[in-house]
Image: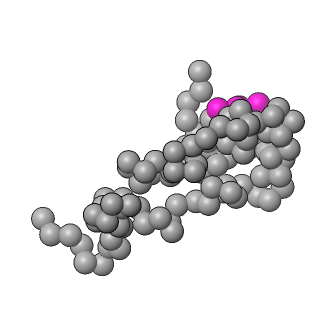
Amino acid sequence: MSPDASAPAVVASGGEVAPSAQPVDQHPSPTTGEGTPEENACVDRWLEERQLDRYGSPEGTMYAGGTPLFDERTGASTDRLVFVYGRHADARSACNPDAGPRPDAPATK
């Protein structure tokens, strides 16, 4: 099967073309998430009060690739709020209680 000439190619860090990966410029920004500015500010305050970084991990956590929102192996990315709410449902209750469960949120235990 030949590659689709209209599909943009993605060049991986080693220089090889990754035809199945999403182009980097199409995944959500790790700094803003997809919520409203007010919801993002509320989540940022909630995390800061608990001494957590912007992804809900203990302050000082280091991430391969600089963010836990982008999987370099698969090219998949996750919205910051989906990621945080998937790990901290109480942050969602505090910052967006009327939204109900997000259909794309990872399951929590």
Rendering coords of residue 26 (x, y %): 50, 66
Rendering coords of residue 27 (x, y %): 52, 61
Q: Is residue 17 left or right of residue 53?
A: left
Rendering coords of residue 83 (x, y %): 61, 41
Q: Is residue 89 left or right of residue 76?
A: right
Farthest residue toward the bottom?
6
Colour logic: one colour
Of residues 29 and 109, the one nearer the viewer is 29
Q: Residue at coordinates 47% horizontally, 64% vertically from top-left?
A: 24
Q: Residue at coordinates 43% horizontally, 51% vertically from top-left?
A: 72
Of residues 32 and 93, the one nearer the viewer is 32
Q: Residue 105 in magenta?
A: no
Q: Is residue 28 above or below residue 67?
A: below
Q: Is residue 25 above or below residue 59?
A: below
Which span is picked out in magenta?
87-92
Toward which corner of the image does residue 93 lie, by quadrant? top right
Q: Is residue 24 left or right of residue 105?
A: left
Whether residue 98 is visible here, answered yes or no, is: no
Q: Residue at coordinates 74% horizontally, 37% vertically from top-left?
A: 59
- The secondary structure that dominates the magenta segment is helix
Rendering coords of residue 42 (x, y %): 84, 47
Toward which corner of the image does residue 38 lie, by quadrant? bottom right
Farthest residue toward the left?
1
Quarter of the image with the N terminus in it: bottom left
Q: Residue at coordinates 72% horizontally, 55% vertically from top-left?
A: 35
Whether residue 33 is visible here, answered yes or no, is: yes
Q: Is residue 97 above or below residue 74?
A: above
